[in-house]
Image: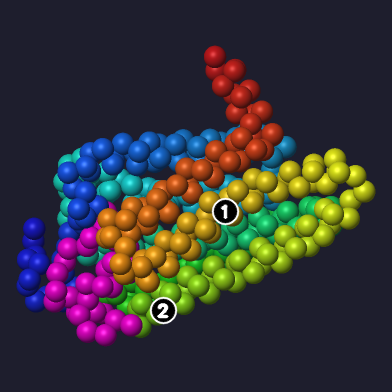
Amino acid sequence: MSNSNTTDFTNPSTFILQGIPGLEAAHVWISIPFCAMFIIAILGNFAILLIVKMEPSLHGPMYYFLCMLAIADLVLSTSILPKMLAIFWFNSREIDFSACLTQMYFVYCFPLMESGIIVAMGFDRYVAICHPLRHSTILTNPVVAKMGLAVVLRSSMLVLPSPFLVRQWRYCRTNIIPEPFCAHMAVVKLACGDTQVSSYYGLFVVLCVMGLDGICIAMSYTQILRAIFSLPTKDARLKTFGTCISHLCVILTFFIPGLFSSLTYRFGHNVPLHFHVLIGNMNLLVPPMLHPIIYGVRTKEIRDRLLGFITHKR
């Protein structure tokens, strides 16, 4: 350990990641489901990218957005899981200060990016159901590219001030982070002095982005449901609504745990620390694992292509 946890220092050369506080003896056992989720996330999202690339019939807006989501899931998973498993398996707890800030930026940025992608997918469902004859003229490839670029720039620019704010604080308490990765609020809490700017800015970004995205999704599905209920037959309504099931499942698996984790971390002061940490980890690990499963099971074109690929290999 290159810095003592009682030494007065500014911008320490390393931080020490504690893992799951209070559950150190169970790290090896905890690593098993975490490693399994990581493998499923990597294989599943790469499979999505490969299938969309190989199948010309999938070259459309919904699948382009799905590929963006898969890439964001891959980056998010690989930014935290390798170091986390190194802690669990090899007790490799040290992380360079700059590497910690970089990891913190990725962990903060890419969930917000996924939120924007999910909104874009909701807009695609809105156009496909409410304006089906104009879908190909509204969501052209240039429009999809601009939407994807806007989502990336929004997340990148909003999160960019956070590591600079964290870097300027003076750290005189400890360099031990009670997490298996560099979470934004966990690092901010180690700083001395008044760090409310970082805390409030982080809360503002999360609530502003998630709140705005939630409103956009609610507006899209209000119009979608109105269009569905105006259809003449029950079968037509069920078939049309079925095209939204995958997207709705992704919304539930992403927004509800994310909001619960964020609010628990900031306001659940009586909740045990290891529960905070486990909830935060599951919030980051579960969606990248579930997204390819949801779309692989629910989307006929992807499911058929995957089954055909497996059968051909056999």
Which color scheme does this rendered protein use? rainbow
Q: Point out residue 199 in the picture as x, y percentages from the top left corner.
A: 36, 77
State which region is magenta.
Answer: 168-196
Residue at image mark 2: 201
Q: Disc 1 marks which amino acid?
A: Leu
Q: Residue at x 28, y 73 (%)?
A: 188
For this orientation, the residue located farthest to the right is: 232
Number of numbered callouts drawn = 2
Q: Residue at x 23, y 60 (%)?
A: 178
Residue at image mark 1: 252
- Of residues 311 and 286, the one nearer the viewer is 286
- Of residues 131 and 204, the one nearer the viewer is 204
Q: Check if residue 188 falls in the magenta segment.
A: yes
Q: Point out residue 99 in the picture as x, y percentages from the top left corner.
A: 27, 60
Residue 158 seen in the current view: no
For this orientation, the residue located farthest to the bottom is: 194
Task: Classify residue 32 as left or right of residue 158.
Answer: left
Task: Classify residue 110 as left or right of residue 299.
Answer: left
Report crowding for label 2: few under 14, some 14 to 19, many 20 or more residues within 10 A (C-alpha): some
Q: Check if residue 278 falls in the magenta segment.
A: no
Mark drawn on residue 107: none
Residue 286 seen in the current view: yes
Q: Point out residue 233 in the picture as x, y percentages from the top left corner.
A: 90, 44
SS at circle 2 = helix
In the rendered view, tell whether residue 229 sits above or below residue 310.
below
Q: Residue at x 74, y 43 (%)?
A: 242
